Image: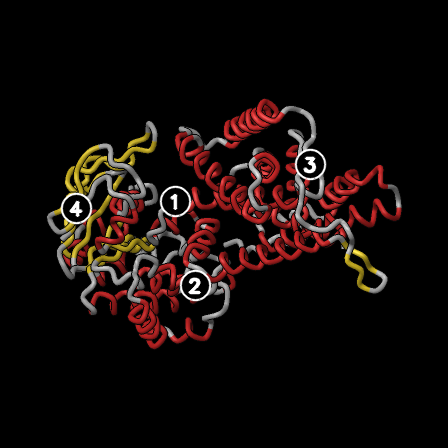
């Protein structure tokens, strides 16, 4: 469904990604793991059109999307839920969700989609008129994910959804992500919690200093000596 | 009454400036020149071309918006740098260029815009006001309300607020940030132009009128908190009332000095502005 081939991305003189090739199949949950600065976030940003490509191609459904704007990529069905939650702090919960559906014009369906989200995440309904900046970290992360879903994406890019959250909240967030996958939405997720990431994913890529150094199914990676030593604490 | 009338137009001026700064992070030194442009356009249409007074104000506003949009599209958008110092220098250059163009076309002598309203004041009990000022006040209030509806209850307003809060996220939500910038600059310029077109017939129109307008707009924005449109609205009224009461009760010679006293006081006591939005960090 999504294919990155020999992708290279630079920030000025610094090369952040070198020759990265990743494939995500329809309905899969694929994770990217690796240390800070390995290029995980950069990969997602390159896919969603936030960063220009220095070399390589990105194909979505057989269509080359390298060089497209974030707006065009969202319109094709890829939603990007950025790192650090990034809710719009002075907008209400409802307005944040409306922003998620910014490109849609089927307003009645948007309203029923919002209703479905409230059924799944009643905490957002309780706070619907509250400005998002006053929500707790976990609620903000729920809102950020829900906002990405409001565009009815076929694929969602999740960047560090558990970052800075308490373990019990993290569990809820992972349940939400599992739900998203069960609904048939393809997920590409960056996750610092390698164990949880490997546990729930279909396949995984390990990035080190801008390159893919290993890939495999979650179980293969869990058994891998290098992965265990470097990322799972033995 | 004078204070409230002046306050309503100051609010328009302040909102325009705070909008451009808040959304585009540009310190807009040309703001006062759009105010002057609005006044000159009103002069051009009413005094030189004999257009209806009300139509002339509309035309002046529209031209302010078009020139603003063009400035964004042909100049600001092409900049290779977003470095605030270089952009500021550019804006100062544009300010000087616009002011000199006005002087070149209309000369340095102040012009008077004739208004269709009677000179005879309207008398309500102990208060007497000129009909022109009532018109200015009513128009400005209507525009302020319209502006707040636009920002808070339309799709464009939602996109503008999102861009203001987080440009990257807004673009990820499908907002075309370039279009928002152009709309913002056009709207900001249009607000300055309409303020100029409204106040032009009350005061005189001269090429340097924009300087003081810019300074006062900055004062209003500082007073209200950078980037806060509600703050700018209230700041506009506060500034005008301080000026009116100051010149009435202390000395009219220091009229403009009072506004700057207010800025100094605000910067010392509450540098984030009186109505700065609350922020949650982390």
Q: Check disc 4 and report the residue beneath it.
A: A22
Q: Nearer the viewer, mark 3 or mark 1?
A: 3
In what element is the residue under mark 3?
Answer: loop
Q: Residue at x 52, y 37 (%)?
A: B26
Q: Are marks 1 and 4 on the same chain?
A: no
The answer to whether the residues at label 3 and label 1 have Cβ atoms under 8 Å apart is no
**In the foreground, A99 or B149:** B149
Question: In the picture shown, does residue B171 fall above or below A183?
Answer: above
Q: Check disc 3 and report the residue beneath it.
A: B112
Q: Earlier in the sequence, mark 3 or mark 1?
A: 3
Q: Earlier in the sequence, mark 2 or mark 4?
A: 4
Cα distance, mark 3 to mark 1?
A: 37 Å
Q: Check disc 2 and report the residue beneath it.
A: A95
> In the rendered structure, the residue with mark 3 lies on which chain?
B
Tag of residue B179: 1
Q: Is residue A202 left or right of residue A74?
A: left
Q: Position of residue B152 (x, y in %)?
A: 50, 60
Cα distance, mark 3 to mark 2?
A: 47 Å
Q: Position of residue B52 (x, y in %)?
A: 57, 46
């Amino acid at each position: 469904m999504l294919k990155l081939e020999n992708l290279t991305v630079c920030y000025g003189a610094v090369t952040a990604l070198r020759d990265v090739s990743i494939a995500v199949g329809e309905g899969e949950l694929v994770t990217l793991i690796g240390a800070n600065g390995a290029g995980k976030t950069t990969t997602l940003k390159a896919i969603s059109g936030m960063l220009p490509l220095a070399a390589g191609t990105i194909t979505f459904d057989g269509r080359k999307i390298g060089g497209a704007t974030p707006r065009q990529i969202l319109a094709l069905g890829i939603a990007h839920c950025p790192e650090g939650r990034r809710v719009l702090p002075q907008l209400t919960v409802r307005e944040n969700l409306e922003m998620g559906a910014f490109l849609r014009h089927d307003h009645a369906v948007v309203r029923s989609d919002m209703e479905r989200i409230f059924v799944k995440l009643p905490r957002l309904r309780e706070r619907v008129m509250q400005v998002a900046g006053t929500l707790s970290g976990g609620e903000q992360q729920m809102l950020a994910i829900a906002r990405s879903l409001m565009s009815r994406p076929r694929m969602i890019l999740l960047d560090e959804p558990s970052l800075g959250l308490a373990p019990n909240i993290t569990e809820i967030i992972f349940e939400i992500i599992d739900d998203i996958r069960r609904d048939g939405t393809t997920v590409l997720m960056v996750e610092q919690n390698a164990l949880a990431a490997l546990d729930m994913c279909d396949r995984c890529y390990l990035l080190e200093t801008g390159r893919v150094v290993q890939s495999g199914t979650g179980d293969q990676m869990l058994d891998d000596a290098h992965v265990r030593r470097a990322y799972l604490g033995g | 009454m004078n204070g409230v009338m002046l306050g309503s137009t100051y609010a328009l001026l302040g909102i325009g400036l705070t909008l451009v700064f808040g959304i585009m992070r540009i310190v807009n030194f040309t703001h006062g020149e759009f105010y002057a442009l609005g006044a000159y356009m009103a002069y051009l249409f009413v005094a030189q071309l004999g257009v209806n007074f009300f139509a002339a104000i509309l035309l002046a506003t529209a031209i302010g918006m078009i020139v603003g949009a063009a400035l964004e599209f042909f100049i600001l958008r092409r900049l290779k740098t977003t470095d605030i110092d270089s952009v500021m220098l550019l804006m100062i250059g544009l300010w000087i260029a616009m002011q000199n163009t006005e002087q070149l076309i209309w000369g340095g002598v102040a012009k008077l815009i004739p208004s269709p309203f009677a000179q005879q004041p309207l008398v309500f009990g102990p208060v007497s006001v000129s009909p022109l000022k009532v018109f200015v006040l009513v128009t400005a209030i209507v525009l302020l309300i319209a502006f707040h509806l636009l920002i808070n209850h339309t799709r464009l307003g939602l996109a503008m607020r999102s861009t203001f809060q987080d440009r990257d996220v807004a673009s990820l939500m499908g907002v075309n940030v370039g279009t928002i910038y152009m709309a913002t600059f056009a709207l900001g310029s249009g607000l300055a132009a309409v303020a100029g077109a409204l106040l032009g017939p009350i005061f005189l129109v001269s090429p340097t009128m924009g300087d003081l307008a810019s300074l006062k707009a900055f004062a209003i924005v500082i007073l209200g908190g950078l980037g806060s449109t509600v703050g700018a609205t209230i700041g506009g009224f506060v500034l005008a009332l301080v000026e009116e009461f100051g010149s009435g009760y202390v000395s009219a010679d220091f009229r403009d000095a009072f506004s700057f006293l207010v800025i100094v006081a605000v910067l010392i006591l509450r540098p984030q502005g009186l109505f700065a939005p609350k922020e949650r960090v982390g």
